[in-house]
Structure formats: structure tokens, C-alpha cells
Amino acid sequence: MPLARGSATSRPVGSANSNRELAMEQATDAMIQVENLSKRYGAKYAVKGISFRVPRGQVLGFIGPNGAGKTTTMKILTCYIAPTSGTAKVTGLDVGQRSLEVRQKIGYLPEDTPLYQDLTVLEFLQFAAALRQVEVSKRTDRIRSVAKVCGLYEVMGESVGTLSKGYRQRVGLAQAMIHDPPILILDEPTAGLDPNQIVEIRELIKEVGRKKTVLLSSHILPIVEATCGRIILISRGELIADGTIEDVVREHGQQSLRLRLDDAAQPELVTEKLSALDGVVGCSAGEDGFQINLEGDDDDELRRRVHACVTDNNWTLLELLRRSTSLEDVFRKLTSAGKA
Amino acid sequence: MGNTLTIFRRELGSYFNSPVGYIVVTAFLVGVAYLWIEVGQVFVEGEATLRGYFYWAPFIFTLFVPAVTMRLLAEEKNSGTLEILITMPVRDWEVVVGKFLAALAVITVAILLTLAFPITLSQFGDLDWGAVVGGYLGLLLLAGAYVAIGLMASSWTSDQVVSFIIAWGITFSLWLFGKLLPLMPSALAPVVEYISLDTHFGNISKGVIDSRDIIYYLSLIVACLFLAVQSLDSRRWK
């Protein structure tokens, strides 16, 4: 599984040669470029040596347990906090040195969607448009445009404080998009939403993701699976996996079969016999049958061997299923490794 | 300039979107009136002067101004809205100056509303308008300095109450130094006299507009705003 890792573009600090920068930006075509990023608080690392690149137009999902470092990484990219070491670049611009320009390129929605409660939706969007440097003549159009995309027409005159969580989230998304930035960074955009609202936001993100580069974090895996072409798994500050969902699942997941036999079969005997088969790395007995963990992929040859084993021992086969590894399985496996 | 104005307008609006703005201004006016009439004994002494008012105003400002400034940055940090604000393409000083001007505007409105007193008083007697104008100018500068201190205090904490206490502590101490001047050992006296807000205010309220006093106030304002910007900026350091 290829990790998308580019060569570190070494550029002299404080270089003001804009032609060269433009050429480099086009050459790498990486919207976000993070090299060996670390953030330390005292003795503890929130983020440790993370590197990745995000090409234009990609929708990237950050997944990981709570406290893994997803939010910290995002806060560094959005210039909210500074890294302890390493570099982070957005469209080729360093977040430390070209902070103002970087912030112009990003639309950010922090976790918990903190908005000014006392403003109406319209006032808030006007405020956001102004501070995000949208030209005065274009503001009304942009507000109308994001209000339409985010479905805010009905609530424009309402106070942000009185909105439901679903609508608040949409306002948050709208303010992030109002200046039409090339990059959106969304931290847990579906946190606290009910299933219907989650679907709405998910569709919104998919729609928006067609034209923009999106970096979103979530620990709700179905959202990530539905919207993201690529994922990065972060745990305890370190990058554990990076790739498309299929690649990551295939690389780190394990194929298995589930077998149900008649009660007459003795569990110890069954597990012993099945484990001995070619292509099987282990077999365990559970409440809903036996799980056969495979070394490689499930195929007909393997199934024949299992069948042969069952008939040789005079067991009665009640059910044979392939158990697909899910992203959740991979998540749990990779993030619990190392725990006692 | 545009960003500063946007933030100024937003902040000013938020003072009057909630009852707090109105309540604080009203409380100030009531407090000042009380001091002026009861403590300054204007009606008893029968003299058309605002001396009582100007004597006590710097003290009552130490309560009133921190009440207005305490939320400026502390509340943004507390509610998390600061994170959206400063990840927008705005400079930290624009945020600080915008908020400073908004708080100052609120207080200026309150101060100007107290013009009702001298106007009323002038109906009853001969009022030295020169001293009044001087006094009000002094109050505006004093207010500016207190707002800057309050904003700085608000930048240091995410708790509004703590912000109030720090701001009050600083402004009250500075006011107190001036009042205690006669008790100071003579070696310290010149230093204390220079630091004291009250001394400089006293000069201006006598109608003497000395550039040194104005410089004092402006320096204080700039220094406090600078420290507030540093505080905001510090999250971007290691």
C-alpha cells in the first residue's frame, strides 16, 4: 500500500521569490503539506512526527480515538496554534510565516461550532464575509449562495442562539465557505446531530467536496466512509495508517469466515481441526459460532478444505459466512494495539 | 482598517443586543448622580460646581469600566468563538483595537449622558464651563486608559469575573496611589505622582491641558493594548 509521501521541498526561509513559489505550488499540486509535525505540551506530545500531503480536490478523513491529535493538527493548519517542530504548508505557504495568507485560503469550522449567539444568521454571515475579505460588492451574492447551498433561507432572520444544532452546524459550514476558499477544514462536523441531520450534513459535504479540498475529522466512521476518498488514522499523536479506505482495510484488516455447526460438534476439536487447515491462521469459538481467521483472502479452494474438514469429522454444517472486515475493525485493531 | 471597523461594529452591537449594556450604563449614571448629590453635597453647599463629580468619577470608573470590558476577550475564549475569529484573515491588533474602540464608545456615551448634570446645574447658577470642558476631557482620557487596562485584563483570562477583578485591582491601585500621595515618603512621591492616574486627571480637570498628561494617558493606552495583543499572539508561540 503506497503511502502518499513526497520529498521534502526545501525552500530557504523567508524566500520572497513569488515566481518560484508559484512554480513550486503548481508542480507539487499539494494543497496541504505536513512534514514531521510535532506539538508538545510540557512533556507530553499531542502530535508526534506526522507527515502527509493532500492533493487538490481530495476529501480526506482524519480518524482516530478522542485525544489522538486530530484536532491539534487541524489547529496548526488553521494557524490557531504553532507547532513545536516540523512544517505545515497550505498551498505552499508556511503556516507560521504566511499566516494571514494561509487563513485566507482556508474555511475552518472548529469542533462544537462556536458561533456568536446574539447575532442573526444574516448578521453573522455578513460579519464573516467582511472579516474573510469578501469584496463588498460581492457579499450579498456570496451570502445568498452559501445560504442556498446550506439550506439556510428559512432561518436567515433568526438568532443563532435559538437555532437547533443541525441549523447551527449549517451556519458554521456557511461561514467557512463564504469566501469560497479552496480548502475546508472541518472538525467533527456531525458531532451531536441526530441521524437525519447527519445525513443532511453528509450530503452537503459530499456536494461541497466535489470542487474543494476538504479535510474533515470524525470518530463516526460511517460518515468518513460515506464522504472520504482517503483516510488518515491517527492514534496517540502518531500517524498509523494512510490511504484509501479499501487499501487500509485490506492492508490491516483480516478476512475471516464464520461457521455454525450442530451442537454435537465439540468446540475444542473443531477449533483444533480447523486451525490446522491450509490458509487458516486461527480459529476461535464464540457464541454465534466459530470464527476462522484467514491468512489471505477467502476463496473457493479454502471453502472446499473447510467443507472437507466438516464432512470428514461428521459435523453438520448449519451456516458458513464470510465476515467482512470493516473500517471499524481496523480502527479498533490499530488503535488498541499497545494497550495492556 | 476595514477589519477593525467590522470588529468595532460587531462589538458595539453586542453591547446593546443584551440587557447588560443598558444595565451597566444605567447603574453608572445612578451611581454618579448619587455621588454628586449626596457625597458631593452640591445642593447643600449651594455652589454650581462639578468638583464633587470630578473628584469621585475616577473612583467609580474603576467599578464601571471593568464591568464593561470584562467580557471583551474573556467571553470569546470561554465560548470558543475566539477560535473562529482569529483563524480568519485578521490581525491580532485589529481585533484588540476594534474591541477597545467599541468599549470606549459605550463609556463615552455614558459620560456624555452625564452632561445632563452640568446643563441642569447651569440653570441654577454660574457654571465655569471651562473647568467643565476640561474635566470632561480628562474623563474621556481616563476612560480610555481604564478601558485599555480592562481589555488587557480580559486578554489574560477566560473568566469574566477574574477579568473584572484584575482590571479593578489595577485601576483601583492606580487611583489609590494618587489619593495616598500626601502619605508617601518624599523619595517615592514623584514616582507615585507620575504613575497615578488621578494626578494627571486632576491636572486636566482644573482646565490645564498639559501635553505631558496627555502623553501619559496615550502611553498607558498603547502599552496596555500592546500587552493585550501579545497575550492573544502568545497562543501562536511554542
Image (tube, grey):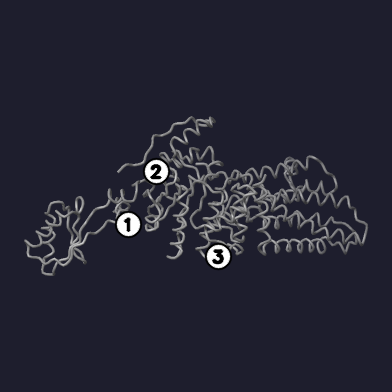
Residue B4 left/right relative to A282:
right
CA gap, disc 3 and disc 2:
38 Å
In the rendered image, the quadrant that contains the N terminus of chain A is: top left
Which residue corresponds to the image point at 42% horizontal and 65% vertical from the top-left?
A195
- Callout 2 environment at 10 Å: few (<14), some (14 to 19), or many (20+)? many
Residue picked out by circle 3: A163
Q: Secondary structure at mark 3?
A: loop
Residue A261 left/right relative to A137:
left
Picture coordinates of residue A340, whole percent (x, y): 29, 54
How many numbered circles are shown?
A: 3
Find out whether the residues at labels 3 and 1 contact each other: C-beta distance under 8 Å. no
In this view, the residue in front, B200 or A202, is A202
Which residue corresponds to the image point at 17% horizontal and 52% vertical from the top-left?
A281
Picture coordinates of residue B165, whole percent (x, y): 63, 55
CA gap, disc 3 and disc 1:
33 Å
Residue B131 left/right relative to A230:
right
Which residue corresponds to the image point at 78% horizontal and 42% vertical from the top-left?
B213
Disc 3 with disc 2 on a shared chain: yes
Residue picked out by circle 2: A48
Letter of the chain that mark 3 sits on in the rendering: A
Disc 1 with disc 2 on a shared chain: yes
Picture coordinates of residue B130, whole percent (x, y): 88, 50
Tell me which numbered mark, 3 or 2, is placed earlier along the sequence: 2
CA gap, disc 1 and disc 2:
24 Å
Which mark, residue A328? 1
**At label 1, which amino acid type do we have?**
Glu
In this view, the residue in front, B230 or B97, is B97
